[in-house]
Image (tube, coloured by chain):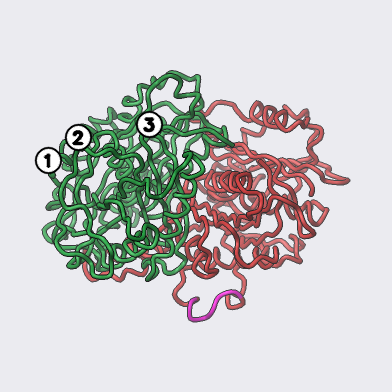
Amino acid sequence: MAGRVFVTGIGIICAIGKNTGETLASLKACRHGIGKITVLDTVHRDELPAGEIKLTNTELAALAGVTDIDMNPRTALLGMIAAAEALQNAGIDPKDNRFRTGVISASTVGGMDKTEINYRHYEKGKPYNNFVLTHDCSYSTEQIAARLGFRDMVSTVSTACSSSANSIMFGARLIHHGLLDRVLAGGSDSLSKFTLNGFNALMILDKHHCRPFDKSRTGLNLGEGAAFLVLESEEALGSRTPLCELTGYANANDAYHQTASSPDGYGPFLSMSDALQTASKNIPGFNLRDISYINAHGTGTDNNDLTEGIAIGRIFGDAIPPVSSTKPFTGHTLGAAAAVEAVISILSIRHNTIFPNLNFNEKIEELKFEPVREMITGVTLKHVLSNSFGFGGNDSTLIFSAC
Amino acid sequence: MEAYIRGTGNISPQATFDKALFLEEVRTYDTARLQVVEPDYKQFIQPIQLRRMSRLLKMGVTAAGICLRDAGIEKPDAIITGTGLGMMEETEKFLNNLIDNQERLLNPTAFIQSTHNTVGAHIAVMLGCNHYNLTYVHGPVSFENALLDSLMRIAEDPAKNVLLGGIEEITMTHFVITGSMGFWKKSLTNTLDLLKDKDPGTAAGEGAAFFLLTATPDEHCYAKVKGLAIRFNPDYGTVAPGFVQEFLAQHGLSPQEIDLAILGLNGDPDSDAVYGPLLESFGGKVPAAYYKHLCGEHYLASSFALWLGAKIMKHGKVPDVIRLAQSNAGGQVRHILIHNHYKNLHHSLILLSSC
């Protein structure tokens, strides 16, 4: 087991852009995507703002280049769009079969948007039951893989809001073990009534625009989206120039509670410290002081931001690097969040820019730091650490390094 | 990549949770739906917790507990699970509430327990296990994905063990909907006749099977997982014979050296047609066994097959109820090949060797 893993392509669709260019433009203009829900059919549309992609499934299908919207859940459509962009960005011809290529996705809802519309119809004797085939998360992954023509490995992981950090990590390890040469790794999750109502019942949705790391924060805004990275081995990379390198990753468990994190953020502490440890194995002379920026999980809930902040303080002491949560731009895209934020972290490295933590006003008393308030440009970012934590205490951290 | 199975825990439609037993008594079902035989959960979970747990959560946590006890390990170094549909009962409960109450005044409990990683996370909380924790949800190869990750973990650090599990439940709603699409046999009256019934469809099942894997054997050892291969077959071509031969060659084995092939026959004529060319390629010389008449067809059925293979190695016998009519397995079992496939779209192979 050896070898480096490079990122050669990125693709994204989220509330602030249907591709990387649009997303970057929105980030640079501090244009967020949180607003009134208009596409999802929910009774909460006027009271719960979200980072919704303002395109219908028919419009998404056109972008994805497919015609069948009955058998393509929104999660699959979003995934196809982001994965195809990542592939194109990497300059890979899907017909080039010299390298073993896998598609590893992550999702929490899969085809739930179809299920929640159709599922009770069976009781009324309606014959349309095909939706059941699209329900489980693997279906959307296979639609994405089929659209792109890759078949050497398809897999899907689901660890709630850290899901796509784990698909990226799994992809990298498959390359390390020599089982694959290239992996499209990421995640996709559409908004659904199921998740919107679930988070609403948990009373962790902010009725206004979310305020991560702010003393007055009251919850998160949900979002939707998909993002994929093309990961390649050194051999597959050849003489091409990568966007960056994936140098650190770790997965740990808080083992405290199904939905709340431990008071001292032990799981987040472990995932960050383990990721830093892998980075120090991969990068000669690496020191945690070399982390130039932390893209935080920073959901805006009382519990997450406090415990993540405590864990960051415990690791970095009095030299905490700039920290921001970009969730006020995109909303919390759940299973796609880690991949969405991986793309934003890579854009930060490539464009020498730290995007701000919108809506921050007053520091959390227990924390040693304030997040980044204003955009920082012209800064060299060597190593960016990105956190993703989920229900079930599933905590994961990725580290991307400039090449 | 290899690993040794040091402990198992299996809750299935058979009374498999008692480690002393090995299919001496077989449960049969008179419909195409096999539900698990539940152990006395109170022996594993505190009553106050038990009341709040969904059925699949109880199954998963208990199977994991049985496995850890069997292996004599308190806290594993990783918890890796696979589930195809995830927590269906809780998902349906929350969906029903959401629809019935027009999205108002919902209780979050079912939502909290509906996420796919619920079982793996709950085991972590119960054991205070802060280590690696992951859930694979890739339909019929969810278990194989979890096994692959487990083997990778052990290769990365041979000092660390892994708790691997496959969990799946079939709810009545899912059974009825998929039944209306022809998934299940309509007139099956005895699950032992699963392969004789020539109607389309199979029988639905469920289960929770856990394994404790380590890099080195000890006196508890069941078997060695010597190899794993997964094949995605979106063209639905005939892949099984070539896939098997290539796999055996990679592991330096000829078909004649396989003492038992455990096959995923499920009674659906289209599905079982995959095995014609496969058995032919063995020249009819390999003793074969089947198991889906015992556990039913479900996304995690291969976890039952791995348990079966491990128990055969440990107990040194092949139960009559799993033998295919034409097979006459006898003598020592040193190598077991497990092949599973789902609608010819996903194939998997697991090679087991004696410790």
Q: Which mark is residue A403?
A: 3
Which residue: 79% across, 55% down?
B314
Query: Marks 3 and 2: CB-CB under 8 Å?
Result: no
The earlier-in-sequence mark between 1 and 2 is: 1
Chain identifier of the residue bearing label 2 in the image: A
What span is colored magenta in the figure? B44-49
As measured in the structure, the alpha-carbon distance from the residue carrying label 3 to the one carrying label 2 is 37 Å
Q: Amino acid at mark 2?
A: Glu
The earlier-in-sequence mark between 3 and 1 is: 1
* Nearer to us in this view, B21 or A231: A231
* Nearer to us in this view, B210 or A162: A162
Q: Quadrant of residue B269?
A: top right
Which residue: 77% across, 57% down?
B218
Q: Which mark is residue A29?
A: 1
As measured in the structure, the alpha-carbon distance from the residue carrying label 1 to the one carrying label 2 is 25 Å
Q: Which SS class for mark 3?
A: loop
Q: Quadrant of residue B255?
A: top right
Q: Amino acid at mark 1?
A: Ala
Does any portion of residue A72 appear in the rendered image?
no
Residue B276, image x and y in percent? Answer: 67, 31
Is residue A215 magenta-colored? no
User: For this view, does A344 lie left or right of residue A259?
Assistant: left
User: For this view, does B131 lie left or right of residue A379?
Assistant: right
Chain identifier of the residue bearing label 1 in the image: A
Q: Which SS class for mark 2?
A: helix
Residue B184, image x and y in percent? Answer: 52, 48
In this rendering, the label closer to the viewer, 3 or 2: 3
Q: Which SS class for mark 1?
A: loop
Q: Colour of chain A?
A: green
Tell which chain the image draws in red.
Answer: B
Which residue: 37% across, 35% down?
A229
The residue under label 2 is: A59
